[in-house]
Amino acid sequence: MCQCESGWKCDSVNGSCYNNLVSTTQTTTASQSCSSATCNTNKHELCVDKTSGYECVCKSGFMRANTNLECTEISSYNYTLTFGWDMSNVNLDKDSEDHKKVKDECETQMTKSLKEKKVDVVLFSITNLRFHFHLFV
């Protein structure tokens, strides 16, 4: 049975932890390293030495949907981030300075959120903002 870090799940069949992007082999033998690893470099995996073994990770631009799957190329990434902002005194006209500030802040928060999830971000750009308003009484 594997012991996984917070946010990771254990695959008890093969003794590895996974988080939908990375599969890591847990071992108690410190002698296991990338030199003896079974990572499939022909299938877009890289081996990373760890203090307690090694970790097979997908190369940048690839991910696995499950620990038993091969790394596949990421062609797109849909992500939703919801902000709770008071927009009552904000000019939302597309050419306004307020619109630019909101767009810039959204891009900053999205990039930060994706990096926290260990998604390689080369460029994140918002091309369209949609505003939905809710009235709470």
Image (cartoon, rainbow, N blue to C red):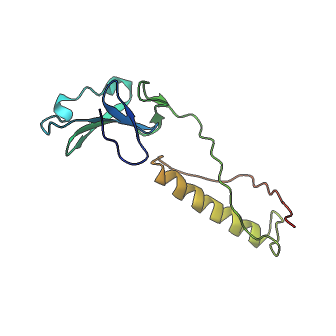
Q: Quadrant where the N terminus lies?
A: top left
Q: Quadrant where the C terminus lies?
A: bottom right
In the rendered view, tell whether residue 49 sits above or below residue 11: below
Q: Residue furthest bottom?
A: 89
Query: Which residue: 41% across, 42% down?
Result: 8
> Going by the image, does 106 lie left or right of 33?
right
Query: Which residue: 14% across, 36% down?
Result: 29
In this view of the protein, can residue 58 be seen by the observer? no
The answer to which of 82 and 41 lies nearer the viewer is 82
The answer to which of 32 and 13 lies nearer the viewer is 13
Locate residue 98: give its quadrant.
bottom right
The answer to which of 95 and 52 lies nearer the viewer is 52
In the rendered view, tell whether residue 114 sits above or below residue 65: below
Disc count in the image? 0
Q: Position of residue 14 (x, y in %)?
A: 32, 25
Locate residue 126: give its quadrant.
bottom right
Q: Position of residue 32 (x, y in %)?
A: 16, 34
Query: Which residue: 35% across, 31% down?
Result: 45
> Going by the image, does 87 lie left or right of 111?
right
